Amino acid sequence: MIDAAGAFAIATFHSTHLVLKAEKILKEAGIEGVRLVPVPSQISSDCGVTVRLRAADVGRAAALLQPIADGLEGFFVESNGGWRPSS
Amino acid sequence: MDKALKPIYLDNGATSFPKPPAVVAAMSHFLREVGGSPGRSGHRLSQEAARVVFECREALAALLGAPDSRRIAFTLNATQALNTAIYGILQPGDRVIATAMEHNSTMRPLRDLERRGVISLEVLPCDGAGRLDLERLGAALRTRPRLLAAVHASNVSGAILPLREVGAMTRDAGTLLLVDAAQSAGALPIDVEADGVDLLAFTGHKALFGPQGTGGLWARPGVEPRPLFRGGTGSNSELEEQPEFWPDRLESGTLNAVGIAGLLAGVSFIAETGVAAIRAREEALTQRLLDGLRAVPGLTPYGPERAAERSPIVSVNLAGLVPSEVGFLLEEGFGVLTRVGLHCAPAAHRTLGTYPQGTVRFAPGFFTSDADIDAAIEGCRHLAAKKAGVR
């Protein structure tokens, strides 16, 4: 069982372009552990990738990603082997 | 032709050559080491390919003053971008104005829509050098047409459109401004925001130093062209409808990622060198060419007087010789490679008085040397003297 601080979150976007834009914004802001991972099938049947980060960084990431919020579908936090929408 | 004769490439208006070595290296690297399909799979090589495409979009947005790189959709060339803009924006009953210097990539789609009764079209005459008369433009804009199609730099006369002035005029009139930047993107400063552009079509393989098969369309938010074709985008895969969001709405099918890798290297070269430095060098080459050619007896140069008023293009004719002969003899005798004929813009040639025979077009580029220019001038002088001797 991973505690909240060690859990992962993902942010999903409309397009691959925005996934990469988000990765760039988060990395440039110094957020650690950001990487691209395949989109979990529970969340989307899209064939592409998405951004994974630490669940503890979701709040900060949401603020940083404000400029592309129109293309942000949502944050999902790892929970019991699945993903639940971040509140 | 003497096989030892070194080719002197003065056809950069058709496509730039040579490319910066980094362009070749980037494409080779992509094919050998990257090779994945951008935005289609989750694995490392697909991600790497997607990153190349993303970085190229970002670099282009920075170069063109576009605040949001999402609004740049890649196309195969400026032609596809112009067709997307024209067919994707215009609606039945729209009135459109175009300058007399437009390339067939603009005129053929517009004439097609006009012939089918979808739009009405007015072509604004230009002066003998290919410059748009801004008073006439102002009068045409008073009727509030839907769109103005204007080429930023003529591929025939080299005449440069005063983009910022024109953009201010179309903005005031509430007319959309579609700019054909095929010759100018990379060669002249462009700032889509400050210049008041609504749609900008560019190619990758000319002044942006990328390979053929690259280009793009930028559009201001709120200006939303319908796609020319629809298909897989790697996004919204559960839906059988085309996504509305950029760039996916206009990018169906696998992108030319290897080409875009080369284009990224080309745009990076421009960013490192500076558009101002590239412009200064090309302007100096063009002035040298103009000065030398004007001294050749029987040679008529077309277009604006000074290099400062034109893109690096000089179209000419030699008395007593047709353009195809001049082009052939320049290559045979001097290794000078030019483009001859009508350059896909018949109205532009009517404006310059060079229809239907066309012109011989010299188009130096950033990698052209002074010696290359001098060889072209010497070639023309030789042909002129020979022609005079025959007479």
Image (tube, coloured by chain):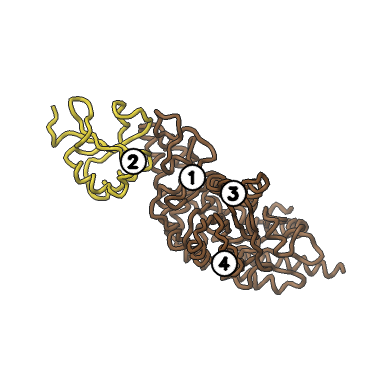
Q: Residue at x 74, y 64 (%)?
A: B353
Check disc 2 and report its element: helix, strand or loop: helix
Three-letter code, disc 1: Phe
- Above or below, B254 relative to B15: above
Question: How far is disc 1 from disc 3 in space, using C-alphas?
Answer: 29 Å
**Foreground: disc 4 or disc 1:** 4
Tell me if B160 is positioned left or right of B223 in this view: right
Q: Which mark is residue A19?
A: 2
Can the viewer see residue B367? no
Along the line of sight, which residue is nearer the eye, B67 or B270?
B67
* Amino acid type, label 3: Gly
Spatial CA distance of label 4 from label 1 is: 33 Å
Q: Which residue is mark 4?
A: B138
How far is disc 2 from disc 4 in space, using C-alphas?
Answer: 44 Å
How many numbered callouts? 4
Q: Which residue is mark 3?
A: B93
Instruction: Decide: few, some or many residues near mark 2? Use Cα within 10 Å; few <14, some 14-19, many ≥20.
Output: many
